Image: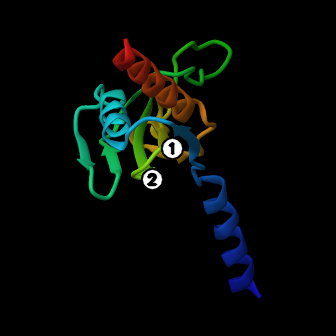
């Protein structure tokens, strides 16, 4: 009985940390969308891109979108970092793009500041990356 309770608790914990992909479709050629997606994550230091499989992954980079602030007396933000996974499918028009952001956060001070904790993505980073991708695609048509 205890084993079942532990399994359920563990499953609920993992379900809270799952990142949900954000989808978009573009009526452009596959190479154009792939290049735009790669350029959208160019701010990350290490980006791996495989055009044949349509997967682009980035390394951990600083997260700068609306950080959580600790306490009433301290205005020190919680540092965040983000890693993107982009999956492109449909080598013909329309090209489908799925963006998943993995977010980690740590406390600004104290013993909790020693390690990163995974937090569920709220969709802000995914939406921001899709906005950047659309900006690159619009710039390419001009």
C-beta proximity under 8 Å, tags 2 and 1: yes
Return the residue at label 2.
90
Residue 50: x %, y % from top left: 25, 52
In this rendering, the answer to whether 92 lies above or below 5 is: above
Tell me the crowding category of disc 1: few under 14, some 14 to 19, or many 20 or more residues within 10 angstroms, Cα based: some
Local SS, label 1: loop
Q: In which quarter of the image is residue 71?
A: top right
Local SS, label 2: loop
Kindly report the distance in space between the C-alpha atoms of the residues bearing marks 2 and 1. Answer: 7 Å
Tell me the crowding category of disc 2: few under 14, some 14 to 19, or many 20 or more residues within 10 angstroms, Cα based: few
Residue 35: x %, y % from top left: 30, 34
In this rendering, the answer to whether 49 lies above or below 52 is: above
Q: Quadrant of the image for the N terminus?
A: bottom right
In this rendering, the answer to whether 78 lies above or below 8 is: above
Say whether residue 46 is left or right of residue 37: left
Task: Give the farthest residue toward the bottom.
Answer: 1
Seen at 30% across and 25% down, the residue is 43
Q: Is any atom of residue 5 visible in this view?
A: yes
Residue 9: x %, y % from top left: 70, 68
Seen at 47% across and 24% down, the residue is 134
Say whether residue 47 is left or right of residue 75: left
Seen at 57% across and 12% down, the residue is 75
Seen at 23% across and 32% down, the residue is 45
Q: In which quarter of the image is residue 12?
A: bottom right
Q: Nearer the viewer, residue 126 or 1?
A: 126
The disc label shown at residue 94, or none? 1
Say whether residue 133 is left or right of residue 47: right
Residue 33: x %, y % from top left: 38, 36
């Amino acid at each position: 009985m205890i084993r079942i309770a532990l399994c359920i608790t563990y499953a609920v914990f993992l379900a809270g940390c799952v990142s949900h992909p954000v989808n978009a479709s573009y009526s452009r050629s596959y190479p154009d969308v792939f290049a735009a997606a790669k350029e959208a994550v160019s701010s990350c230091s290490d980006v791996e891109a495989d055009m044949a499989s349509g997967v682009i992954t980035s390394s951990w980079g600083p997260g700068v979108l609306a950080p959580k602030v600790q306490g009433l007396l301290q205005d020190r933000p919680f540092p965040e970092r983000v890693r993107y996974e982009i999956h492109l499918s449909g080598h013909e028009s329309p090209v489908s793009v799925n963006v998943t952001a993995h977010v980690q956060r740590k406390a600004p001070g104290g013993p909790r500041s020693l390690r990163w904790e995974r937090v569920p993505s709220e969709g802000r980073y995914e939406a921001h990356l899709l906005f950047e991708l659309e900006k690159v695609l619009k710039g390419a048509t001009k």
